[in-house]
Image (cartoon, rainbow, N blue to C red):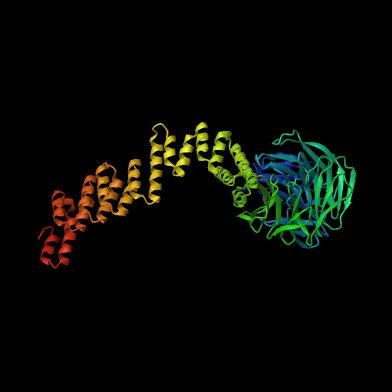
Amino acid sequence: MFNGIISIRNKNGEEKVKIERPGGSLSPIWSICWNPSREERNDILAVADWGQKVSFYQLSGKQIGKDRALNFDPCCISYFTKGEYILLGGSDKQVSLFTKDGVRLGTVGEQNSWVWTCQAKPDSNYVVVGCQDGTISFYQLIFSTVHGLYKDRYAYRDSMTDVIVQHLITEQKVRIKCKELVKKIAIYRNRLAIQLPEKILIYELYSEDLSDMHYRVKEKIIKKFECNLLVVCANHIILCQEKRLQCLSFSGVKEREWQMESLIRYIKVIGGPPGREGLLVGLKNGQILKIFVDNLFAIVLLKQATAVRCLDMSASRKKLAVVDENDTCLVYDIDTKELLFQEPNANSVAWNTQCEDMLCFSGGGYLNIKASTFPVHRQKLQGFVVGYNGSKIFCLHVFSISAVEVPQSAPMYQYLDRKLFKEAYQIACLGVTDTDWRELAMEALEGLDFETAKKERKKRGETNNDLFLADVFSYQGKFHEAAKLYKRSGHENLALEMYTDLCMFEYAKDFLGSGDPKETKMLITKQADWARNIKEPKAAVEMYISAGEHVKAIEICGDHGWVDMLIDIARKLDKAEREPLLLCATYLKKLDSPGYAAETYLKMGDLKSLVQLHVETQRWDEAFALGEKHPEFKDDIYMPYAQWLAENDRFEEAQKAVQGRRG
């Protein structure tokens, strides 16, 4: 009300809460608005009065925080985007954006007269403004991403006035409340720089611990700066202003300045000693430069025909990857300026910080991983690649960043296919499966690259030199020497496997464990397989039977039509071994030996199969005798019998058979 009082009433008009603003009639209430957010624990009322203040109250009437001075008479207040921000307009002839706590962030739009109303379109970022002179304006608010990344630390703006630092590996987060609009963020090693409207804050980590997330203020530069990009180094701040770079000390003193030929499109710190760091700079005219913080002269690395969008340098500083305005990723040799290769559909690129020849680039909804000059390995992924460390790729999607674990198997096998074992080992160290590690070791041994094979063993925790040397001897064809070393290292089973795989069964027998039935069976089975493959089927049958592999023995006998051997096996089998007995009976029936097949079915107690056998072979007397003893099978006997009689023109007998009687 005009007297500075706010009355909160129920739907019947009864007053429940009365709030009196300081100043009374000198602070007439001009606009109020409830926060629509469902995430707030309490109902919050925003109040704008002509004491030129904005204040906040709970439903109980208790004030939240202190009054916020405005320096103008507010005529309208409303919440924006589900209660995250506030829109305010009035005698200052403009609409301003505030945080939900009343911190001014900036101007939405300037007008020619007082602003009397401003409202946001529900669930959108559009704002409509009505003024004293009758004009209506329509605005779209776009919130840019303000962030910085260094290796596995990502800093980003939250709620416009806070900075959150996220450790991408441990997922730890720390919030730094600035209580002012955060304009720029830069992070490098243990430094964090935050630009606010009137100052720059430089933070440092409490300790050198890689997982430490505690930051403290190191320096403050109390000065207003206008810049497009901000970079922090160990002892300096770098400001980018269109074509100009300025280097400031943490005390705010300008130490150096570089003037470029064209607009600066990209800048990145590429490491170096404190106070002497190197910067990688990409320009709109396609020029790429390297600048050292302690050197006034910029070094031109190369110049291409198209504007630079994104840059990165390989771990050894020998290769340069560039994404240009045509969405092409180009990779150059820095020393020779030679274009090594180029790939289309790229919006950002990053080299692997642990591997010289690996890079990844994103674009078109895909993540592309390229090792050396091999073909690209592609997988679906939305967003922008911003970092590549070991087996983790860091991707920015909308306003959040995530670490994507990428198996390195595909590039490792690309190197293996070309017998580049040392390079394959480097890739494997980034992260592959145990199976991939073993494959690498085997390929290296076969390629006689024993050094790589030995490294692989050590990587997996194997330190037994005798065992490694035994593998080497086996690949060199020195099998007996290998067997001795396997035995000495306590791995006689490996000697057994080696001799068995080589079909050197006489030597293999020397390494059988003391009466171990499993090893004995394995050896005999392998020997039988070998005999079968070299066209010695009878020897194979005997070995399979000896090893207890009856099914394999029966299959060979059946395929060769050896009825005598089949019935011999069937008679020696236990009646509980149904699978081999059933297979025997099937082969005997197929080989026109129904009597032996019947004997086998009878041994199994499989009367249904026995009835079916008698019917199929038209041995009706045996079938009827079985039917007399087991009446449940009569229908299975008489119906086929009736059909057989009818087919042989014995219709009267067939009619009786249908009735379950013999003719």
Could you tell me residue 224's position as x and y percent? 86, 47
| 225 shown above or below 323 | above
Which residue is drawn at the image coordinates 35% and 43% (left, top)?
543
| Residue at (81% x, 48% y) in the render | 279
Q: Is residue 219 left or right of residue 615?
A: right
Q: Is residue 179 left or right of residue 393?
A: right
What number of labels is visible?
0
Q: Is residue 439 visible?
A: yes
Residue found at the far bottom of this picture = 649
Residue 55 falls in image quadrant:
top right
Residue sitting nearer the eye, 552 or 394: 552
The answer to whether 567 appears left or right of 662 in the picture is: right
Q: Write down the quadrant of residue 616 in the picture.
A: bottom left
- Tell me where residue 398 appears, x and y as whole percent: 67, 52
In the picture provided, is 641 more to the left or to the right than 503? Answer: left
Q: Is residue 137 above or below residue 503?
A: below
Q: List x then y, in percent, for residue 43.
A: 66, 44
Q: Can residue 26 be seen by looking at this rendering?
A: no
Instruction: Determine which quarter of the picture holds residue 221.
Output: top right
- Residue 250, position as x, y percentages in the image: 85, 40
Which one is nearer the viewer's eye here, 576 or 489?
489
Image quarter (top left, top right, bottom left or bottom right) of the C terminus:
bottom left
Foreground pick, 155 / 308: 308
Q: Residue at x 33, y 48 (%)?
A: 538
